[in-house]
Image (tube, rainbow, N blue to C red):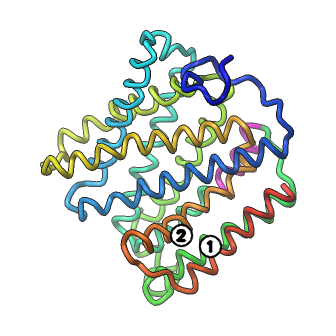
Amino acid sequence: MLPDSSPALYCAAPMEPVTSPPDQSKMAAAAWVLAASLAFSLLYASGKLTGGLLPALQIVFIRYLSGFATVSGIAAYQRLTPARALGTGRRWLHLLRACCGVFGGGCSIYGATHMPLADASALALLQGLFVMLLAVLLLGERLRRAQIVAALVCLAGAFVIVRGNAPNGTFGGGSFANLLDHGIAPLAAILGALLTACEIILIKYLTRHETMLSMLLHVNGFAVLLLLPAMLWLWTDADWATLGALCLLGPMAILGQMCNVRAYRLADAAWLAPFGYSSVAFGALIGWIAFRDLPGAATWAGAGLIIGGCLLLVRRG
C-alpha cells in the first residue's frame, strides 16, 4: 500500500482500515467534508458565470463531462488499463449513485425554478436529516445524543441564514403554508434532498469496497450518459470563452468528490451529516467576497450556530 501522500492512492486498492486514534480520524474526516463543502459551494456559485443564459442541466452536463475527462486523464497518466481502472463487481451501485445524483439535482433545480428560492433552499436543508436517518436504517450506524443536538444546532443555523436571505425575512411572502400554492415543486425539492442523501449513503458504502478512481470514473461517466438525451433537446449555444470557463467546473467537482470519499472512509455518514450545513455558510461567504452580497445579521448568526454545532460535534460526538 502506498502512503497517503502518493497520487497513486486514487487508483490503488481500497484503503486499509484506519489505524489512527478515533478522535484523530474524525477530525480528519471533518476537515475533508468541510473542504468538499467549500469546493461544491464554489461550484454552485460559478453558475452565475452564465447570467442565467444556459439551462442548469447543461451546466451540470458540462461539469460531469469535464469531470470524466479529468479522471480519465489521471488514469491515462498512471498508465492504467480500462479494466484495471474500472474493475468492480458493483457497477449497478455506481449507476444507482449516478441516478440519485443526477435526478436529485434535477428535482432540486425544478423546485428552485418553480417556487421561491428561499423556500427551495429551506426544504433542501432536509438532506442532512435524511442522511442521518438513512445511515441508521441502512448502514446500521448509531446516533449519540451529542450528534442529534449538534445536527439540530447546525440545521437551525442554516435555517436562519436561508430565512434571512428571503424577501423581507419571510418564506413565499408569508409562511410555509404558501408552499401548497406551488404545485409539485415543493415535493420535487424534498425528493431532491432525499435522493442527494441516498447518494451520500451510497458513497459511504462504496468507500468500503471500491477505489477512489473507480468511484469517480463511474459516477461521472454514468451521469454523462444519463444527461446526454436531455442535451440533444436542451443544448443552448454559447461562446467559447463561456464554455471554456464552465469546463473548469469538472476538475473542481472532482476535487470535491475526492474530499467526500476521503471523509466517508474515515467516519460514519450520520456523524458527518451536520458538517454539510457548512455549505450554506460558505455560500454566503462566497457571495460576500465574489459578488459583494453583504451578509446581514441573520447570516452572521446562522454561521455562528453552524460553527458552534460543528465544534460541539467534534468535542462531544
Q: Is residue 279 left or right of residue 248?
A: right
Front label number (1 vs 2): 1
Considering the image in quadrants, where does the C terminus appear? Answer: bottom right
Query: Is 257 included in the stretch rendered in magenta?
Result: no
Question: Is 4 situated above or below 232?
Answer: above
Give the number of the disc on residue 126: none
Res 225 → quadrant: top left
Residue drawn at (61%, 53%) of the image: 34
Residue drawn at (84%, 46%) of the image: 23
Q: Which mark is first along the chain, 2 or 1?
A: 2
Tell me if mark 1 has few (under 14), some (14-19) or many (20+) residues whose alpha carbon lies within 10 angstroms of its own.
many
| Badge 1 element | helix
Considering the image in quadrants, where does the N terminus appear? Answer: top right
x then y, percent, for residue 42: 44, 57
Question: Is 38 situated above or below 123?
Answer: above
Res 281 → quadrant: bottom right
Per the image, the residue denoted by label 1 is 303
Question: Is 181 situated above or below 44?
Answer: below
Residue drawn at (25%, 54%) of the image: 55
Q: Is residue 23 left or right of residue 131?
A: right
Residue extent of the magenta highlight: 129-139
Tell me if mark 2 has few (under 14), some (14-19) or many (20+) residues whose alpha carbon lies within 10 angstroms of its own.
many
x then y, percent, for residue 97: 51, 35
| Badge 2 element | helix
Query: Is 136 included in the stretch rendered in magenta?
Result: yes
x then y, percent, for residue 198: 58, 43
Per the image, the residue denoted by label 2 is 122
Amino acid at circle 1: Ala
Res 158 → quadrant: bottom right
Amino acid at circle 2: Ala
x then y, percent, for residue 79: 43, 12
Q: Main secondary structure of the magenta part?
A: helix
